[in-house]
Amino acid sequence: MKKSRSDGGYDSPDHTAWKWEDWDHLIASHFSHLIPMILQVKSEGPKLVPFFKATCVYFVLWLPSSSPSWVSALIKCLPIFCLWLFLLAHGLGFLLTHPSATRIFVGLVFSAIGDAFLIWQDQGYFVHGMLMFAVTHMLYASAFGMRPLGLRTGLLMVILSGLCYAFLYPNLTGAFTYIVGVYVAIIGFMGWRAMAGLQLVGAAWRWTELAAGTGALLFIVSDLTIALDKFCFPVPYSRALIMSTYYAAQMLIALSAVESREPVEDYRLSKAK
């Protein structure tokens, strides 16, 4: 007969059996949350094939940024066009009845316009591109909503945004001193709203919130690289880093709209309250 743990020996057979059953239950409960996510991601994969193909076309062609043209603008915007189609593939009714998904779709429209402006940034259209992306970030933040508030996440984003602006500030001149400050505040706000509701464990965990938070973080990395390369110092392989994080960010944010946070009925009800 085995000794109990209190005697300094081994667990009793009954106690060991209880432990294994407890582990089985724990593992099963975790996988029960993962299975819907895996099935959902698997169902969305085929709709993203055009996006991946268009992204490959952009990186394979790698048209020189020194010679802007409407062709290069089209190639750059093509992956974003495919994300329009990805959301439209869920049906126009889906967009009309889910305000958050509609805002993400409109944000993608402004993103494409901003991409086109940035093709001609050396010809004086950089600020126009910044404006389009500022609108995009405000639309995304509105889509992510203000619940839960996530004050700790907000404080962290304020600190990080302040540090980024403080680093950029000595290299900013003229109107960019203010324009970049406003833009940093807007994208920081968007990042806060994307990550405020993120829960990695528990029954409230949703893979779409993880997609939104990761997408926002990648968007910030992409824009920060643009700012460093334009205002501070040449960033090695900047274009590859900027575009890879940018396309990944847009894809993840578009994916986050699939499991929309607020159907229109709940949206109107919350407004009435």
Image (spheres, rainbow, N blue to C red):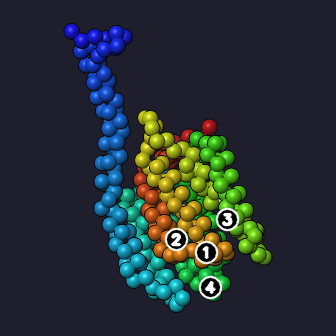
Give the residue drawn at x 45%, y 85%.
Answer: 63
Residue 41 in percent (x, y) is at: 34, 53
- The secondary element bearing badge 1 is classed as helix
In the rendering, which numbered label is found on residue 229?
1
Q: Which residue is mark 4?
A: 122
Up/down of 59 relative to 255, above or below: below
Quarter of the rendering occupied by the N terminus: top left
Give the residue drawn at x 52%, y 90%.
Answer: 67
Q: In the depicted view, which residue is nearer to us: 93 or 254? A: 254
Cα separation, mark 3 vs mark 4, equals 19 Å
- What residue type is disc 4 on? Asp
- What residue type is disc 2 on? Ile
Q: Which residue is mark 3?
A: 183
Q: In the depicted view, which residue is nearer to us: 88 or 160? A: 160
Q: Is residue 59 left or right of residue 188?
A: left
Cα separation, mark 4 vs mark 2, equals 17 Å
- The secondary element bearing badge 3 is classed as helix
Report the mark closest to the observer, 2 or 3: 2
Q: Which residue is mark 2?
A: 242
Q: Is residue 222 left or right of residue 166?
A: left
Cα separation, mark 1 vs mark 2, equals 10 Å
Mark 2, other Cα within 10 Å: few <14 / some 14–19 / many ≥20: some
Mark toward the start of the polypeptide (1 vs 3): 3
- The secondary element bearing badge 4 is classed as helix
Up/down of 157 relative to 80, above or below: above
